[in-house]
Amino acid sequence: MTDPKVEAARIEVERSKAEMLGTAKVLQQRLQPGKLTRDAWESAKEKGADLAEDAVDAVRKRPYAASGAVAALALFIAREPIMDLFGKLTDAMTSKKKPSAKAPAKPAAKPRAPRKPATAK
């Protein structure tokens, strides 16, 4: 014959054990890589949609400011090609001024004699 308190404790342990195993199964299902990936993808899509909607609302409220920001960003991104273009334009403008054919050519410089090394006294 067993004590009723011991039997009640044993039943409580079995109930707790079953509850814990159920919780472990739920956690295993939640933490499966495929499920985590799907959840992350859905969350990213929702966040992206919210950001896009906020951006559209901001552009509708301030179209000139948005246009200026886009223009500034485009200039920043294209700064190297723009600087190259301005360099080519200025080179083309300055190269149009060619020296006249009648100007005398500079005589070639005479080579100098090498210097003698200084001697210590």
Image (cartoon, grey):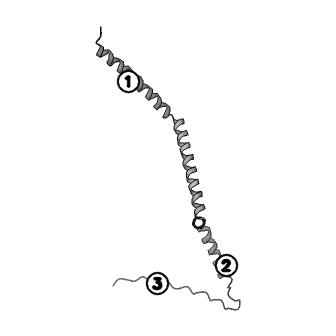
Going 56% across and 51% down the picture, which residue do you hit?
A: 50
Q: Please state if 78 lies on the left or on the right of 116 as rendered.
A: right
Disc marking residue 16:
1
Q: Secondary structure at mark 3?
A: loop
Question: Above or below — where is 71 with respect to 109?
Answer: above
User: Residue 35 in the image: x percent, y percent?
Assistant: 53, 36
Query: Viewer-nearest of labels 3 and 1?
Result: 1
- Going from N to C along the chain, the mark reached first, 3 or 1, is 1
Of callouts 3 and 2, the N-terminal one: 2
Tell me, for residue 92, which label it has, or none.
2
Q: Which mark is residue 115?
A: 3
User: Is residue 5 or residue 27 the one in the foreground?
Assistant: 5
Question: Relative to 45, is 96 on the left or the right?
Answer: right
| In-front residue for pair 62/112 | 62
**Closer to the camera: disc 2 or disc 1?**
1
Q: Residue at x 32, y 15 (%)?
A: 7
Marks 2 and 1 sit apart, C-alpha to C-alpha, by 87 Å
Where is residue 51 shown, x and y percent of the image? 55, 53
Rendered location of residue 37, percent (x, y) = 54, 39
Residue 100: mark: none
Measure the alpha-carbon separation of dots 3 and 2.
42 Å
Q: Quadrant of the N terminus?
A: top left
Relative height, residue 29 to residue 56 (above, below)? above
Q: Quadrant of the C terminus?
A: bottom left
Could you say whether the residue bearing mark 1 is in a helix, strand or loop? Answer: helix
Q: How many marks?
A: 3
Cβ atoms under marks 3 and 2 closer than 8 Å:
no
